[in-house]
């Protein structure tokens, strides 16, 4: 199978996994918002913020290097595997030690025990982490997708069962641990059969990996803080209740970034890495990726903003209406993050982990100063500041893309004209319909009508503005299926 058709097949299987896990995750969220309190979600956000940061260091930044390097030996993979286990165990012990400090920072005395239970994830994830990278590198996305779907289903079952048993915040924790255990177990079972690590640990095997890994850890660290400073500041200064409402809004907006964008970026990195010496091909592939990402994410986010007053009530209940304005303020940030995600794949494929690191250093510094001021004016000010920072960072990102691949800003921006125009027109019409219908129909029926109207309008506008795009996309997907068969 050609590399292009492998990529198309990878996108299709990743899409299947994404759709399934998104539906499962959204269903889990919709059920739990009716069974748990806003404070429960706020407490979990506090825990996840710190645990997520620690996970940045769990693999020592070597995961990306495994995909980037095309000459990795079995000795090197064995050393990397055991180093990952050692580092994760060390992080587990460190997290246990700092749990009282985390509880004190957030002024939540009862946070310590659930925080320690969640830290068990450091002993679970590394069992299969390297094998996930090897599946990605080999473009074996069918196997990876099946594993992720099964893990998500188990997490949903555990979450709902625990919530019905009145476990509170532990419902969210047990779901995360159950999903991680299932995923690590299946990855480990497959990986040990096909890439069995030997009992080999030699630091000289890591030559050429440390530099890449350090930049990767540095980039992930600053990127993580840039994306979680709002949780830290809201949790500390405004409390668990406002943080719970903000968390629901933020998760809705970044869902396309965390679920839909990786459909392409997960495939793009190993494909770009195999073509790392062909700048013209990389530019062409990158532009195709951002156009496809915007084709999918822009209408979802603009449609969410337009119908938010109905969608929030229909899905989560009237108690969460405070999230509506936050969703609308965060949508520009979500749109820009979705199309910014593929740039990391391009930088890493060119071996320029340093570029992503320094970009995120600048972004994090600016974000910290702005949000430190904004949080004093409430969650709406924090949401608006996030979007303002995302817009202001566009020129720097365009410059870095030109620096690494000589991608011209005009070529980049032209790919966004049609999805932005079609989504904007669709959003304006859906918003007008929402204003007219929301007091005449039940929230669930109104949401169904608005969703159908938005989908029909968007497809019609694309056919009007770019008649050849969707038929061409369909032909490409069909060719990938035919060659796979």
Image (cartoon, helix red, strand yellow):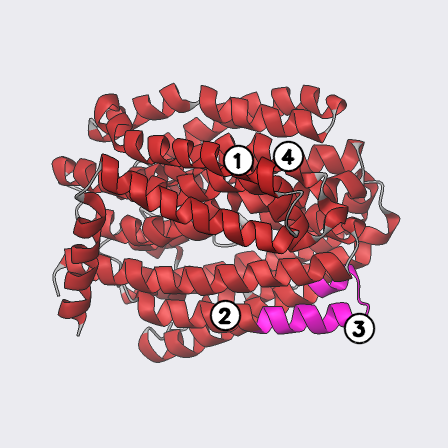
Q: Which residue is mark 2?
A: 183
From the image, state whether disc 4 or disc 1 is nearer to you. Answer: 1
**Among numbered discs 3 and 1, the one appearing first in the sequence:** 3
Give the left or right position of residue 478, taking residue 165 as reference.
Answer: left
Q: In whole angstroms, how far apart are the C-alphas of marks 2 and 1?
A: 40 Å
Q: Dividing the image into 4 quarters, which one contains the C terminus?
A: bottom left
Q: Which mark is residue 326?
A: 4
Task: Give the percent coordinates (x, y) of residue 255.
Answer: 51, 48
Q: Residues within 10 Å of mark 3 (few under 14, many from 20)?
A: few
Residue sitting at the far front: 440
Q: Is residue 371 shown to the viewer in this render?
A: yes
- For residue 204, what is the image quadrant? bottom left
**Among numbered discs 4 and 2, the one appearing first in the sequence:** 2
From the image, state whether disc 4 or disc 2 is nearer to you. Answer: 4
Disc 2 to disc 1: CB gap under 8 Å: no
Q: Which residue is mark 3?
A: 165
Task: Give the percent coordinates (x, y) of residue 310.
Answer: 62, 45
Task: Specify the segment rendered in magenta.
Answer: 154-172
Give the left or right position of residue 268, taking residue 457 as reference.
Answer: left
Q: Which residue is mark 1?
A: 431
Q: Is residue 54 shown to the viewer in this render?
A: no
Q: In whole angstroms, how far apart are the C-alphas of marks 3 and 1?
A: 40 Å
**Among numbered discs 4 and 3, the one appearing first in the sequence:** 3
SS class, disc 4: helix
**Among numbered discs 4 and 1, the one appearing first in the sequence:** 4
SS class, disc 3: loop
111 in relation to 285, above or below: below
Disc 4 to disc 2: CB gap under 8 Å: no
SS class, disc 2: helix
Q: Residue at x 16, y 57 (%)?
A: 475
């Amino acid at each position: 199978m050609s590399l292009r058709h492998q990529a198309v097949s990878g996108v299709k299987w990743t899409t299947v996994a994404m759709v399934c896990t998104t539906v499962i995750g959204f269903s889990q969220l919709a059920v739990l918002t009716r069974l748990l309190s806003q404070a429960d979600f706020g407490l979990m956000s506090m825990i996840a913020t710190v645990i997520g940061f620690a996970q940045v260091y769990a693999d020592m930044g070597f995961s990306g290097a495994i995909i980037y390097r095309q000459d990795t030996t079995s000795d090197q993979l064995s050393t990397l595997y055991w180093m990952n286990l050692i580092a994760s165990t060390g992080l587990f012990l460190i997290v246990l030690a700092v749990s009282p400090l985390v509880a004190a920072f957030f002024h939540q005395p009862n946070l310590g025990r659930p925080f320690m239970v969640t830290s068990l994830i450091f002993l679970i994830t590394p069992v299969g982490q390297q094998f996930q990278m090897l599946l990605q590198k080999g473009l074996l996305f069918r196997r990876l997708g099946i594993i992720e779907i099964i893990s998500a289903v188990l997490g949903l079952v555990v979450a709902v069962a625990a919530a019905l048993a009145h476990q509170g915040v532990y419902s969210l924790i047990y779901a995360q641990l159950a999903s991680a255990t299932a995923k690590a177990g299946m990855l480990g079972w497959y990986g040990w059969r096909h890439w069995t690590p030997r009992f080999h640990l030699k630091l000289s095997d890591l030559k050429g990996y440390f530099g890449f890994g350090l930049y990767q850890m540095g980039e992930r660290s600053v990127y993580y803080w840039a994306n979680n400073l709002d949780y830290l500041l809201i949790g500390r200064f405004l409390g668990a209740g406002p943080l719970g409402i903000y968390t629901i809004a933020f998760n809705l907006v970044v869902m396309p970034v965390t679920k839909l964008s990786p459909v392409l970026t997960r495939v793009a990195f190993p494909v770009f890495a195999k073509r790392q010496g062909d700048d013209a091909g990389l530019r062409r592939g990158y532009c195709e990726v951002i156009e496809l990402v915007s084709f999918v994410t822009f209408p979802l986010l603009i449609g969410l903003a337009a119908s938010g007053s109905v969608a929030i009530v229909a899905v989560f209940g009237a108690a969460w209406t405070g999230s509506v304005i936050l969703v609308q303020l965060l949508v520009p940030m979500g749109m820009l993050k979705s199309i910014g995600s593929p740039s990391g794949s391009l930088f890493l494929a060119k071996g320029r982990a340093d570029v992503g690191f320094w970009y995120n250093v600048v972004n994090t510094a600016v974000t910290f100063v702005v949000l430190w001021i904004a949080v004093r004016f409430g969650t709406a000010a924090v949401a608006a500041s996030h979007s303002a920072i995302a817009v202001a960072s566009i020129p720097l990102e365009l410059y870095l893309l030109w620096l690494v691949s000589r991608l011209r800003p005009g070529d980049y921006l032209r790919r966004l004209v049609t999805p932005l125009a079609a989504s904007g027109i669709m959003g304006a019409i859906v918003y007008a319909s929402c204003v007219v219908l929301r007091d005449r129909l039940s929230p669930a029926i109104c949401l169904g009508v608005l969703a159908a109207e938005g989908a029909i309008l968007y497809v019609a506008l694309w056919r009007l503005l770019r008649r050849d795009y969707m038929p061409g996309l369909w032909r490409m997907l069909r060719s990938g299926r035919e060659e796979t068969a």
